[in-house]
């Protein structure tokens, strides 16, 4: 603690009741010094931001919690270039508020944006229905400042969109759950704020009844910004956000497409796009399931046919990413997860286990596991950063 206090000042080093120490560095250089100290003494380190996704991956018990709360500034926003540079501890909401002053935004709808930080969102590769139009988080990041486990400071990418120099490490570390590097800064490509958003929802008893319309929308020239399928025991809803000038009459085109399938769109509140957050209740086991886009409606209906004492609520992106809340007895929930994982067409991660549910967060194929272990050894040979998040020892 004395050596950490010498790096980050005594007031920003706090001993926890479990023996771990929380330290809050003020800049990238202090992060570097802390990791160099941890590497020297083989102390494990867990980076933390807003704490909204700490359950994602295996449970870790590090010696040092590295809080990035003080790295919370938007460093640079050259709005003419549609790019920005932001520190990892800045909340997503604060970033968007800053960018909106010039009519721009980072095109991502992250979970719990008022608390989630840039670094945590990057580490978890979180994204919502805006991915339909703007692509994934990896498509939005054009550069990063990273600190390796031994304290080495590295920079990848750049501050301009058309940058192809060097290895694209930004895409590798996005989604690594803090097991490879500590992200201290990120550069994003930006987009103009949408001006003509209108949200609609279409209801049906089964998701299968919405599947033909969903396929038609994806294949059409309709200017959809977001597509989302919600499914529960009470029925299915397809949410569509259109972003086009009123004179384009896109809502009329949507209504005509829906009519061909016996459906009627109803305009709804934009708050519908925050529904993904509601499934993270304290008593729910939350899964992230990936499927082919063509199986979005199929899986949503299958979830309702699981054991009667395990109820499912799902919010699915049209590209095939499903956030699913399972409620019920621990045995029923575990059995449902096992069934889902037995289907080779699904990739299932446990983001949040309910009390009593003991299932591994990830099931990794041996061929992929070998590659992941090799990458981990090269970036973090001593297993300093978040050991156990993906697999034992790493």
Image: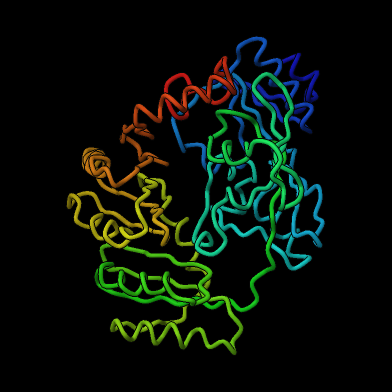
Colour scheme shown: rainbow
Is residue 237 visible to us here?
yes
Residue 387, image x and y in percent? 51, 23
Task: Look at 49% across and 77% down and name the residue there.
Answer: 222
Q: Quadrant of the N terminus?
A: top right
Is residue 336 visible to us here?
no
Residue 269, image x and y in percent? 50, 75
Quadrant in the rendering for residue 184: top right
Report the front residue among 19 and 158. 158
Residue 347, image x and y in percent? 34, 43
Determine whether 8 is above or below 341 in the image: above
Residue 115, image x and y in percent? 61, 49
Report the front residue among 125 and 159. 159
Report the front residue among 265 and 169. 169
Task: Look at 77% across and 20% down and name the residue there.
Answer: 5
Report the front residue among 94 and 200. 200
Determine whether 103 is above or below 295 in the image: below
Determine whether 380 is above or below 108 in the image: above
Quadrant in the rendering for residue 57: top left
Q: How many marks on residues? A: 0
Determine whether 200 is above or below 382 in the image: below
């Amino acid at each position: 603690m004395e050596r950490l206090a010498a790096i980050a000042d005594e007031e920003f080093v706090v001993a926890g009741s479990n023996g771990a120490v929380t330290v809050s560095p003020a800049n990238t250089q202090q992060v570097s010094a802390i990791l160099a100290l941890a590497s020297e003494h083989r102390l494990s380190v867990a980076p933390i931001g807003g704490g909204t996704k700490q359950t994602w991956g295996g449970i870790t018990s590090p010696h040092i919690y590295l809080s990035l709360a003080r790295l919370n500034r938007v460093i640079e926003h050259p709005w003419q270039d549609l790019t920005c540079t932001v520190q990892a501890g800045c909340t997503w909401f604060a970033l968007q508020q800053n960018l909106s002053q010039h009519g721009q935004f980072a095109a991502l709808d992250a979970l719990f944006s008022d608390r989630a930080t840039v670094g945590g969102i990057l580490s978890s590769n979180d994204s919502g229905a805006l991915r339909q139009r703007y692509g994934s988080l990896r498509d939005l990041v054009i550069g990063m400042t990273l600190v390796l486990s031994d304290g080495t400071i590295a920079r990848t990418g750049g501050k301009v969109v058309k940058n192809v120099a060097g290895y694209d490490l930004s895409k590798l570390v996005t989604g690594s759950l803090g097991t490879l590097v500590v992200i201290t800064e990120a550069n994003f490509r930006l987009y103009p704020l949408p001006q003509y958003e209108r949200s609609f929802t279409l209801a049906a008893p089964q998701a299968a009844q919405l599947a033909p319309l969903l396929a038609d929308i994806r294949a059409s020239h309709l200017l959809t910004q977001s597509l989302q399928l919600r499914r529960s025991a009470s029925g299915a809803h397809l949410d569509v956000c259109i972003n086009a000038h009123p004179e384009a009459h896109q809502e009329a085109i949507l209504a005509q497409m829906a009519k061909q399938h016996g459906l009627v769109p109803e305009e709804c509140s934009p708050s519908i796009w925050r529904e993904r957050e509601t499934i993270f209740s304290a008593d729910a086991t939350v899964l992230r399931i990936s499927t082919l886009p063509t199986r979005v409606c199929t899986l949503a209906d299958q979830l309702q046919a699981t054991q009667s004492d395990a109820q499912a609520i799902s919010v699915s992106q049209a590209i095939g990413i499903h956030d699913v809340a399972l409620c019920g007895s621990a045995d029923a929930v575990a059995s449902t997860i096992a069934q889902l994982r037995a289907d080779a067409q699904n990739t299932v991660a446990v983001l949040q286990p309910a009390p009593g549910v003991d299932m591994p967060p990830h099931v990794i194929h041996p061929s992929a596991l070998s590659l992941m272990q090799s990458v981990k050894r090269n970036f973090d040979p001593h297993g300093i950063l978040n050991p156990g998040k993906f697999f034992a020892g790493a």
